[in-house]
Image: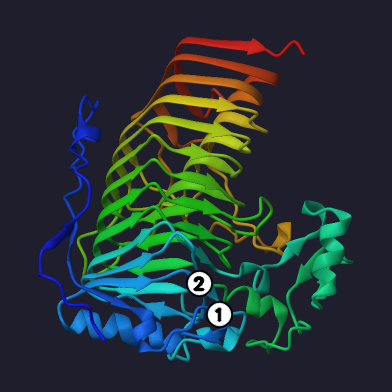
């Protein structure tokens, strides 16, 4: 059942060329290798007809190959219906260009074994693994419409009619739709649509892993976030596409949460929430990978997103040594977005952002905000938690932004901190040209200290 070839390393590209002439020392990624051994999922009974459930066959292929030392799990041309799958050590999931890995709408397949779990299993997961990859040119589809709530104000009349034709229930006087009691016949897995919404999973979510390689593949239509590694090290993301409807609730594209030693290059994003985002939560015991450090992001394109490059809203353990350069954002809600709040904040150090080209930005080209509130579907202003202690206060500092050109935004540069606290300071913006339609700046000088040098803010005359 296994195609056994010589055990020679299958090596990723050399990424050293991206680390030249950096403004700060960023620890580079190291090559990720897999044994040159392969097994097709068809040998274990998988059928790519879009009807046969292939979960067991795919997982058996992964487990068997990993037990032999690892290699390439091949997903050939076809539509492969599956439930959640778990990667193992030294496994490279390789998708043919005409392969679609399609995750089942049967929510019961994703229920966690642990009854205390607050969420269901991710579509693709890994825990404490070394050397995992997803490569090729194929497509991974999370079938997210079966999970996501929909806000009426974000869809056309035709789209709203299409959602209602699936079944579902409306809330808040018809302004919010939940995929509940759908006509497809697949059952619900919670007591209410609101509770089921909170159980939504990510498309690719890995925890405490080392050596992660993602190249070439399209990740699309996640129930929640798309590419989401946690507390992991040595991550190469090269040439992937991440896409979902522009109005997909919480449809983040690439979220790096408490990750060290990462490169994101040559990738394309078109999503419903944050584009390329760095996050850091509470410190985790049993790992030395807390906070975000040594990240290089370059040569990427972001179309729709709430922000092209984003930090936050959680950055509790800090964001250090990050270089973002040579990227283009077209049609994002904001360009460079730094967001946090009391209880979510930490300190940034050594952030360098340069050569960012933007067009048709709906809001601010650059924005710093320290009163961000997470607003899940169905939430109200009164649901915002009360701040009871000054813990985890945000501090955006040591950030250097240069050579940004933006043609078309509502506001050029906006920044506000928190009264009585030093939350936004020592930030310099240099050699930038921004064409705006409403305001050149909206900077609260009492709470935010930015230095603008050779920054041209030009009103749009159209």
* Front in this rendered view, residue 240 or 397: 240
Residue 184 x, y percent position in the rendering:
74, 84
Q: Residue 391, can we see it?
A: no
Element on which disc 2 rests: strand
Residue 133 x, y percent position in the rendering:
30, 63
**Residue ID for mark 1:** 49
Q: Answer with mark 2 or mark 1, whichever residue precedes in sequence.
A: 1
Q: Is residue 42 left or right of residue 413?
A: left
Element on which disc 1 rests: strand
- Give the farthest residue toward the left: 7
Residue 139 numbered mark, or none: none
Q: Residue 303, can we see it?
A: yes
* Front in this rendered view, residue 140 or 20: 140
Residue 78 numbered mark, or none: 2
Q: Which residue is pictured at 39% across the width and 59% down the height?
A: 281
Residue 396 x, y percent position in the rendering:
41, 36
Q: Exactly how many numbered labels are in the figure? A: 2
Note whether 392 is above or below 432 in the view shown.
Answer: below
Separation (CA) of disc 2 from disc 1: 6 Å
Q: Which residue is pictured at 71% across the width and 67% down the height?
A: 149
- Neighbours of disc 2 within 10 Å: few (<14), some (14-19), many (20+): some
């Amino acid at each position: 059942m296994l195609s056994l070839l010589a055990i020679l390393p299958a090596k990723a590209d050399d990424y050293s060329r991206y680390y030249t002439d950096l403004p700060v020392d960023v620890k580079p990624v190291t090559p990720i290798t897999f044994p040159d051994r392969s097994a097709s999922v068809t040998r274990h009974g998988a059928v790519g007809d879009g009807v046969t459930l292939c979960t067991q066959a795919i997982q058996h292929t992964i487990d068997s190959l990993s037990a032999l030392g690892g290699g390439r799990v091949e997903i050939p041309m076809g539509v492969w219906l599956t439930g959640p799958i778990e990667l193992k050590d030294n496994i490279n999931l390789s998708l043919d260009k005409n392969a679609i890995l399609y995750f089942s709408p049967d929510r019961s397949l994703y229920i966690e074994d642990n009854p205390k779990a607050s969420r269901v299993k991710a579509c693709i997961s890994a825990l404490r693994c070394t050397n995992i990859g997803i490569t090729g040119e194929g497509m991974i589809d999370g079938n997210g419409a079966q999970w996501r709530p929909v806000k009426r104000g974000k869809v056309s009349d035709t789209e709203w009619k299409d959602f209602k034709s699936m079944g579902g229930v409306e809330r808040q006087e018809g302004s919010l739709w939940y995929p509940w009691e759908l006509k497809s016949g697949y059952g619900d897995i919670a007591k209410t649509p609101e509770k089921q919404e909170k159980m939504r999973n990510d498309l690719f979510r890995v925890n405490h892993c080392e050596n992660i390689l993602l190249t070439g593949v399209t990740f699309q239509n996640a129930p929640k976030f798309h590419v989401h590694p946690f507390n992991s090290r040595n991550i190469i993301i090269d040439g992937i596409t991440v896409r979902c409807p522009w109005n997909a609730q919480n449809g983040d594209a690439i979220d790096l949460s408490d990750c060290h030693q990462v490169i994101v290059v040559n990738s394309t994003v078109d999503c419903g929430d944050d584009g390329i985002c760095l996050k850091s939560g509470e410190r985790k015991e049993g790992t030395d990978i807390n906070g975000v450090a040594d990240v290089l992001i370059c040569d990427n394109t972001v179309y729709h997103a709430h922000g092209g490059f984003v930090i936050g809203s959680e950055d509790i353990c800090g964001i250090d040594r990050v270089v973002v350069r040579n990227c283009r954002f077209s049609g994002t809600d904001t360009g460079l977005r730094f967001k946090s709040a009391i209880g979510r904040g930490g300190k940034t150090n050594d952030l360098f952002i340069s050569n960012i080209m933007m067009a048709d930005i709906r809001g601010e080209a650059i924005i710093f905000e320290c009163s961000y509130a997470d607003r899940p579907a169905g939430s109200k202003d009164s649901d915002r938690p009360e701040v009871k202690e000054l813990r985890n206060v945000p501090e955006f500092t040591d950030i250097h932004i240069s050579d940004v050109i933006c043609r078309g935004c509502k506001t050029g540069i906006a920044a506000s901190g928190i009264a009585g606290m030093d939350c936004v300071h020592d930030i310099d913006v240099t050699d930038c040209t921004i064409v705006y339609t409403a305001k050149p700046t909206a900077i609260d000088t009492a709470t935010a200290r930015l230095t603008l040098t050779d920054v041209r803010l030009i009103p749009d005359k159209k």
